[in-house]
Amino acid sequence: MLHDSRFWASITRLILLAGGTVLIQYVIGFGMALLVWREVRGRRFWRVLFLVPMMTTPVVMAAIWQTIFHESLGPANDLLDMLGLNRIPWLTESGPALVALMTVEVWQWTPFMFLLLLAGLLSLPKEPFMAAAIDGAGTGAPSGR
């Protein structure tokens, strides 16, 4: 097994998939958590909206994403056509399939990362933020939860 090139290619794709998606999910999830951690209008609405991809049934989402990435009928290739680019065989070649899989993975699991990071932000004590505001620091802390 250790001398098989297909094994090492699979391990490389697995590391790329896992590492890449988790990194992207962390960055996007942290940005989303920071947006609703502060006092913003309609933050409860945004919290619920950010969780929708995680709450939808995976089977339904698989069918929808398969339609989006369909080689001849999918909107992803229609968008590429409008931009004057070549169509991509999203689900039949390994490179584009990895990109499509990473897109779906990030879309579905970023809300979970958002939820974890928001919980961490909400657990921070307010006193250091109030002390910093008294000392003249910026107003980045939320006033309520």
Image (cartoon, grey):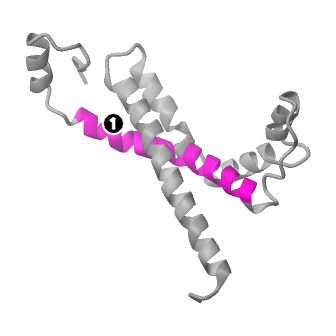
Q: Nearer the viewer, residue 126 or 135?
A: 135
The stretch drawn in magenta includes residue 113: yes
Judge left or right: residue 89 versus residue 140.
right
Percent position of residue 21, x then y: 53, 51
- Residues in magenta, as a range: 95-122
Judge left or right: residue 17 versus residue 79.
left
For label 1, count other residues whose C-alpha is less than 10 Å away and answer few (under 14), some (14-19) or many (20+): many
Examine the rendered structure and indicate whether residue 143 appears above or below residue 7.
above
Q: Residue tagged by mark 1?
A: 118
Please report the residue visible at 46 percent of the width from the left and 25 percent of the height from the top: 46
Q: Main secondary structure of the magenta part?
A: helix
Judge left or right: residue 99 versus residue 142.
right
Percent position of residue 91, x then y: 79, 56
* Quarter of the rendering occupied by the N terminus: bottom right
* Quarter of the rendering occupied by the C terminus: top left
Q: Nearer the viewer, residue 61 or 137?
A: 137
Examine the rendered structure and indicate whether residue 24 appears above or below residue 31.
below
Please report the residue visible at 56 percent of the width from the left and 87 percent of the height from the top: 2
Please tell me whether mark 1 sits on a helix, a strand or a loop: helix
Q: Nearer the viewer, residue 62 or 68?
A: 68
Q: Please, which residue is most extreme toward the right here?
A: 72
Q: Quadrant of residue 122?
A: top left
Percent position of residue 56, x then y: 59, 45
Amino acid type at circle 1 is Leu
Please report the residue visible at 51 percent of the width from the left and 30 percent of the height from the top: 49
